[in-house]
Structures are given as C-alpha cells and as structure tokens.
C-alpha cells in the first residue's frame, strides 16, 4: 500500500468513527430528552398528588369543624331541652302538690 492509500484509509476510518460517535451522541440526546420529559411528567404527577392531598386535608379539616359545630349546637339544644324538662318536672310537681292541697 502506498502512503496515500494508508492516509485515505485512516481518514475513512476516522470519518466512520466520527459518524458513529455523532450517531451515538444523537441517540444519547434523544434518550436525554425522553428522560427529561419523563422527569417533568413525574414531577407534574407529584405536584398534582400533593395538591390533591392538600385539598383532601382541607376538606377533612372543614368536615371536622362542621362536625364540631354541629356537636356544639346539638349539646346546646340538649342542654336547653334538659332545662325545660327540669322546669316541666318542677311545674308538674307543683301542680301535683296544689292538687293534693285542693283535695284536702
């Protein structure tokens, strides 16, 4: 082989290696883009889940506050009924006493 042929062969090998390297870089770039897109999607999903947890937590807190409010109202109504029941019992006893007095 002549020096010129050897040089041409070396250039061809270098060009082939360069094209292979360029193809590898392109493949890795596409893989990187796909990985980046996947990461963004995972991040979006994570943020949505975080928002759902926050909304659920706030709803749970509101429900607990509503239950407490209803419990307080129910307790106040129960107390009012107990007071009126006591008053009714006192009136009933008074009426019974007056009835006994009237009979005697």
Image (cartoon, helix red, strand yellow):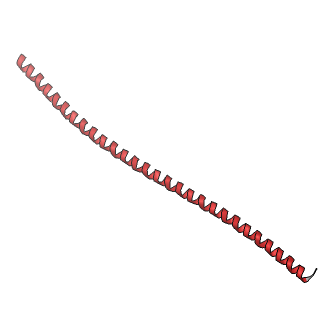
93 over 30 or under it: above or below = above
Q: Using residue 86 as the reference point, say whether residue 101 is left or right of it.
A: left
71 over 5 or under it: above or below = above
Q: Quadrant of the N terminus?
A: bottom right
Q: Nearer the viewer, residue 57 or 24?
A: 24
Q: Using residue 34 as the reference point, say whether residue 67 is left or right of it.
A: left
Q: Position of residue 67 (x, y in %)?
A: 34, 42
**In which quadrant of the rendered view does residue 73 lie?**
top left
Q: Position of residue 96 (x, y in %)?
A: 12, 22
Q: Nearer the viewer, residue 21 or 63?
A: 21
Furthest-right residue in this view? 1
Q: Position of residue 11 (x, y in %)?
A: 82, 77
8 over 53 or under it: above or below = below
Residue at 84% across, 77% down:
10
Residue at 36% across, 47% down:
62
Q: Nearer the viewer, residue 94 or 79?
A: 79
Residue at 14% across, 29% down:
90
**In which quadrant of the rendered view does residue 21 lie?**
bottom right
Q: Using residue 55 as the reference point, say whether residue 41 is left or right of it.
A: right
Furthest-bottom residue in this view? 3
């Amino acid at each position: 082989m002549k020096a010129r042929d050897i040089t041409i062969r070396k250039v061809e090998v270098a060009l082939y290696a360069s094209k292979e390297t360029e193809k590898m870089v392109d493949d890795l770039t596409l893989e990187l883009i796909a990985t980046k897109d996947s990461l963004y999607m995972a991040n979006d999903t994570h943020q949505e889940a975080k928002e759902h947890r926050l909304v659920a937590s706030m709803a749970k807190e509101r429900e607990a506050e509503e239950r407490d409010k209803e419990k307080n109202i129910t307790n106040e109504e129960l107390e009012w009924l107990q007071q009126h029941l006591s008053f009714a019992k006192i009136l009933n006893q008074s009426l019974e006493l007056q009835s006994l007095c009237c009979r005697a």
